[in-house]
Image: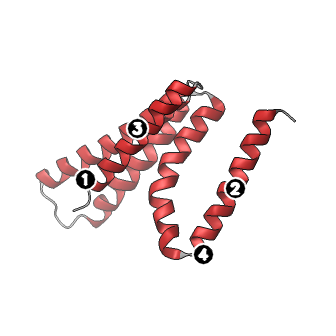
Amino acid sequence: MDKMKIIWTVTITSLVVVLVILLVLYNIGIFFVIFVVPIAIPIAYGYKTGERATSVLLGGLPIAIAIILPNFLHGNGYGIQRWVEVLTYSVAAGLVCGLEGYFSSKQNLRSLAISICFSFIWIMIFFYGID
């Protein structure tokens, strides 16, 4: 088996085991789902496949939808100012996750480091949006 396939198999298996363990420990599992999954999926997918467009969409759309949809469904008569805030926040978070996927899809170490820097920016944006 190719060395890269072995590394990816061990990495994915380890992540699944860690996810199961953390989900058993509820509070840590919630932290894992909120922070690690949105950051890791575009980076891992982009680096593994090298598909730029799909990596950007996989990073950006789920985050934007996850932020906009609950606000739309809850919608207690939000004013235009609140909707502008929600859209700005969701676009910023989705854009940063999309950039993670884009840079990781270049499949070199420098772009992967840039992608990881975008993950830290995403965490800062996430905390900024908590009311």
| Residue at the far right in the pictured view | 1
Residue 19 sits above or below residue 93 on the image: below
The numbered mark at residue 22 is none
Q: In the image, which disc is placed on residue 24?
A: 4
Disc nearer the start of the sequence (4/3): 4
- Report the Cα–Cα distance between label 2 and label 4: 16 Å
- Report which residue position mark 1 lands on: 128
Q: Nearer the viewer, residue 78 or 96?
A: 96
Query: Mark 3 = which residue?
Result: 118
Query: Which residue is under mark 2?
Result: 14
Q: Horizontal placement of 128 versus 44: left or right? A: left
Identify the element where label 3 is drawn: helix
Q: CA distance from mark 2 to mark 3?
A: 24 Å
Amino acid on which disc 2 is placed: Ser
Q: Amino acid at mark 3?
A: Phe
In x, y percent, where is residue 4? 75, 34
- Looking at marks 3 and 1 on the same chain, the residue that comes earlier in the sequence is marked by 3
For disc 4, the neighbor class at 10 Å (few under 14, some 14 to 19, many from 20) is few
Instruction: Tell me where residue 102 appears, x and y as whole percent.
Output: 49, 29
Q: Are the two marked residues, 2 and 4, in contact with CB atoms closer than 8 angstroms?
A: no
Measure how far apart labels 4 and 1 are at the Cα level.
29 Å
Asked if the residue at tag 1 contacts the one at tag 3, i.e. Cβ–Cβ closer than 8 Å, the answer is no
Mark 2 or mark 4: name the one nearer the start of the chain: 2
> Which of the marked residues, 2 or 3, is nearer the chain's N terminus?
2
Q: Residue at x 65, y 34 (%)?
A: 48
Q: Earlier in the sequence, mark 1 or mark 2?
A: 2
Q: Splitting the image into 4 quarters, where does residue 34 fall? A: bottom left
The structure residue drawn at horizontal position 58% and vertical position 68%, both measured from the top left corner, is: 22
Q: Quadrant of the N terminus?
A: top right
Q: Secondary structure at mark 2?
A: helix
Viewer-side residue, 84 vs 41 = 41
